[in-house]
Amino acid sequence: MSNRVLVLYGSYRSDRMGIRLANFVIDRLRGRGEEVEFIDAKAIGLPMLDRMYKEYPKGAAPEALEKLAGQIRGADGFVFVTGEYNWGIQPGLKNLTDHFLEEWFWRPAAIVSYSAGRLSGARASTAWHGTLSEMGMVVISSTIGVGPIAQTLSAESEPIGEGGKALERSFPRFADDLNWWIEAAKAQRARKAPPY
């Protein structure tokens, strides 16, 4: 039985390089039989956070929020594909994430980071770890960092060069860890209702 995984991506740039990595992750997860849905913060276009989804009366949330809440609640796990802006988190993805809270609970999250340089978005990955944990997700220990992204993935999201080879080698372990945590969380939720 396949798992339902949301791949979330947050760049708003006009020339988005990270989309290559998002597409790579989606393709490889689907190749493993997972049911994958892409959540593109730019395409959804939520306004800067004023009111969280839970702060609207039932049935009164804007359509985009209502739809996204259902997608998040229906997921078994999440992959956050994040670039690094000035040593930090991309604002578009953070804004999308902050519109929700309870919807994220009791599911695992994985972080895949990238940058134009050699540090592969490591500082953004570290920042996301604490943020996602605070929001009720179990952040898996396996991460993927890609950089320089233009020398690792082609415009068609295919691995190139030594970086591409390293990415191909690391992805199965990453996906196995995510799957393990998804299965563990599903079993626990089936066995026992969350404490709150």
Image: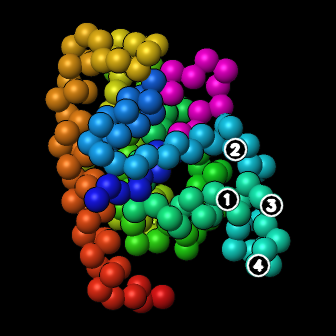
Q: In percent of the image, x 24 and y 69: which residue is there?
A: 184
Alpha carbon of mark 1 to alpha carbon of mark 3: how far? Answer: 9 Å
User: Which residue corresponds to mark 2?
Assistant: 44
Give, as a three-letter code, the residue at label 1: Lys
Indicate which disc residue 58 carries: 4
- For the N terminus, the image quarter is bottom left
Mark 1 or mark 2: name the one nearer the start of the chain.
2
User: Which residue corresponds to mark 1?
Assistant: 67
Q: Is residue 180 visible?
A: yes
Give left or right: position of 52 versus 28. Answer: right
Which contiguous range is marked in magenta? 9-19
Give, as a three-letter code, the residue at label 3: Pro
Depth check, front residue: 141 or 108: 108
Give left or right: position of 49 versus 103. Answer: right
Residue 168, horizontal then vertical, whole percent: 22, 27
Residue 145, horizontal then vertical, whole percent: 32, 33
Q: Residues within 10 Å of mark 4 (few under 14, many from 20)?
A: few
- Secondary element under disc 1, as helix, strand or loop, is helix
- Secondary element under disc 4, as helix, strand or loop, is loop
Alpha carbon of mark 1 to alpha carbon of mark 2: how far? Answer: 10 Å
Residue 169, horizontal then vertical, whole percent: 17, 29
